[in-house]
């Protein structure tokens, strides 16, 4: 069974190395989309921020065509909203949309938990407990509640062996991060880790109802934490500045996409 990893959350511009063959615009677009996704997930790009094609093209060193393709990809993920005559913006869900995202995660995570209670044995639960316990080690630089949260629930979804559910959950979680960024600051990593251990213990003992309540409380917390008020208080920032700052905080030296885009990139 493929192990769920958090690596996708930490991809920096160094991922796009100057080594290797020239990439087609479609591949470059996916790299730009991934970079923007990560900037959204770590809250560097706030909801409502306008994604100017020219600004992004300059930041990533690619053509506007590549940026446009990346924005379309982000739109299909629900992370970006494209408005006619106005451009593209980081999604800023209204209260009803945010509520539906939270409720959808409750449904799929509770369903996954119920499935595991019915189908896993003692050996499987021991392995899950071991992996969750490892996550309780002193946090590494950059460890946050969202990454801890994603790791834990992705692990449970992984153990169902259902790739469709895994894909749907990953997309919902990315949208959940936008909701979370509008609701409250990140919670304590250690508190989150303790809750994860308790939830696994409950499920391993077949106490699904108690675990389901914990899942519901966690997922609905943003809605109960003044989401509506924060929705109108948050002001978007300049995408160029936010992305430049995100690049500077990457673990490795940023590498421009243009180095792999080849000559005449402005005509791509």
Image: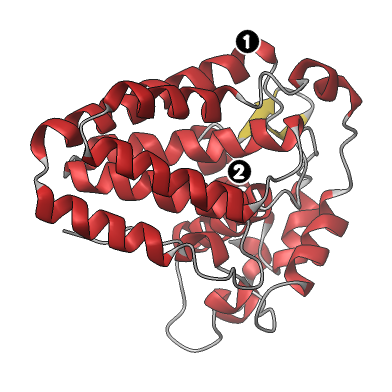
Residue farthest along the top direction in this orientation: 96
Instruction: Give the label, 2 or 1, closer to the camera.
Output: 1
Give the answer, above or below, for where 76 lies relative to 66. Answer: above
Give the answer, above or below, for where 21 lies relative to 128. Answer: below
Under circle 1, the secondary element is helix
Q: Which residue is mark 1?
A: 96
Is residue 229 at all visible to an observer of this figure? yes
In x, y percent, where is residue 208?
28, 26
Look at the image and tell me in which quarter the C terminus lies: bottom right
Under circle 2, the secondary element is helix
Locate residue 240: give its quadrant.
Answer: bottom right
In x, y percent, where is residue 31?
53, 62
Q: CA distance from mark 2 to mark 1?
A: 24 Å
Q: Is residue 56 left or right of residue 146?
A: right
Locate residue 63: give its quadrant.
Answer: bottom right
Q: Tag 1 or tag 2, which sits nearer the N-term?
A: 2
Q: Which residue is mark 2?
A: 71
Give the answer, above or below, for where 75 lies relative to 60. Answer: above
Which residue is rendered at x = 87% and y = 38% of the image? 236
């Amino acid at each position: 069974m493929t192990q769920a990893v958090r690596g996708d959350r930490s991809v920096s511009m160094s991922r796009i190395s100057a080594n290797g063959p020239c990439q087609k615009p479609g591949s470059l677009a996916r790299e730009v989309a991934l970079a923007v996704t990560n900037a959204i997930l770590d809250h560097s790009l706030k909801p409502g921020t306008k994604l100017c094609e020219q600004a992004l093209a300059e930041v990533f060193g690619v053509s506007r065509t590549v940026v446009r393709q990346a924005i379309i990809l982000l739109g299909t993920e629900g992370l970006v909203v494209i408005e006619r005559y106005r451009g593209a913006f980081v999604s800023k869900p209204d209260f009803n949309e945010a509520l539906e995202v939270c409720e959808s995660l409750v449904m799929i995570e509770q369903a996954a938990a119920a499935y595991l209670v019915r189908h896993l044995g003692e050996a499987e639960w021991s392995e899950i407990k071991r992996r969750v316990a490892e996550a309780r080690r002193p946090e590494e630089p950059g460890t946050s509640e969202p990454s801890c949260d994603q790791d834990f629930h992705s692990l449970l979804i992984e153990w169902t062996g259902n790739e469709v559910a895994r894909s749907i959950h990953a997309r919902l979680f990315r949208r959940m991060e936008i909701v979370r960024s509008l609701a409250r600051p990140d919670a304590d990593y250690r508190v989150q880790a303790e809750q994860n251990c308790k939830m696994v213990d409950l499920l391993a003992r077949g106490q699904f109802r108690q675990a389901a309540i914990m899942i519901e409380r966690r997922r609905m917390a943003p809605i109960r934490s003044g989401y509506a008020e924060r929705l109108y208080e948050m002001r978007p920032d300049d995408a160029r500045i936010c992305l430049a700052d995100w690049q500077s905080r990457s673990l490795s030296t940023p590498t421009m996409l243009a180095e792999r885009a080849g000559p005449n990139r402005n005509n791509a």
